[in-house]
Image (tube, rainbow, N blue to C red):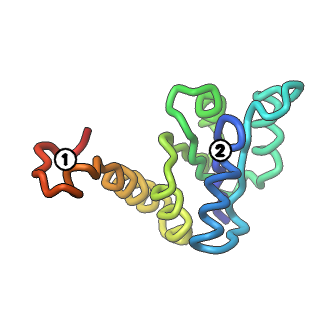
Amino acid sequence: MRHIIVATHGKFAEGILDSVRLIMGEHKEVQPFCAFVEQEVNLNDQVDALLSSIPETDEILVAADLMGGSVCNEFIRRLDRPGLHIVAGLNLAMLLEMIANVDLPINDVIRSAVELSRESIVYCNPLAVGTPVECDSF
């Protein structure tokens, strides 16, 4: 089985999953991981508790909010766990793609989600006024 963990600072994970439910409905394989919501909870312990609740034989795809952030870094420290994959730079397009393709091979899911995520970042003003865009991304 594959699990998707949406790992963020604060309650961003819950918020983006609210949008996912609005668009795609409920998905039991997806769960939020909200760090730094309770001051007395240690991030290291929180990640350990979450990962230990998932069977070692299951795949885990972590969609983290920020590369280099403490939440992403804490999961990266555990990359020795078999079947753990981490993608940073979470956005809604990425997450929808991961969920829609949860049954595909993990490498295909990651490649597709990252590509779609990049393509979904667009400066819209030039499109609205008919001005040609000089570069593909900003």
Q: Which part of the image, by quadrant, shows the C terminus? A: top left
Circle 2 SS class: helix
Give the number of the disc on residue 136.
1
Q: Is residue 77 left or right of residue 124?
A: right
Q: Is residue 114 left or right of residue 47?
A: left
Q: Is residue 122 left or right of residue 54?
A: left
User: How many discs appear?
Assistant: 2
- In this orientation, which residue lies closer to the viewer: 59 or 25? 25
Q: Residues within 10 Å of mark 2 (few under 14, many from 20)?
A: some
95 lies above or below 71: below
Q: Amino acid at mark 2?
A: Phe
Query: Residue 40 appears at what percent x and percent y?
Result: 89, 25
Q: Residues within 10 Å of mark 1 (few under 14, many from 20)?
A: few
Residue displayed at 77% across by 55% down: 55
Q: Which part of the image, by quadrant, shows the N terminus? A: bottom right
- In this orientation, which residue lies closer to the viewer: 18 or 73? 18
Looking at this rendering, what residue extends furthest in the right direction? 40
**Residue 45, image quadrant:** top right
Marks 2 and 1: in contact by CB < 8 Å?
no
90 lies above or below 26: above
| 3D distance between C-alphas at marks 1 and 2 | 28 Å
**Residue 48, image quadrant:** top right
Q: Earlier in the sequence, mark 1 or mark 2?
A: 2
Residue displayed at 65% across by 74% down: 25
Query: Residue 35 appears at what percent x and percent y?
Result: 73, 35
Q: Amino acid at mark 1?
A: Asp
Query: Residue 109 appears at what percent x and percent y?
Result: 46, 61
Circle 1 SS class: loop
Query: Residue 111 appears at what percent x and percent y?
Result: 38, 55
Tag 2 residue: 12
Looking at this rendering, what residue extends furthest in the front direction? 129
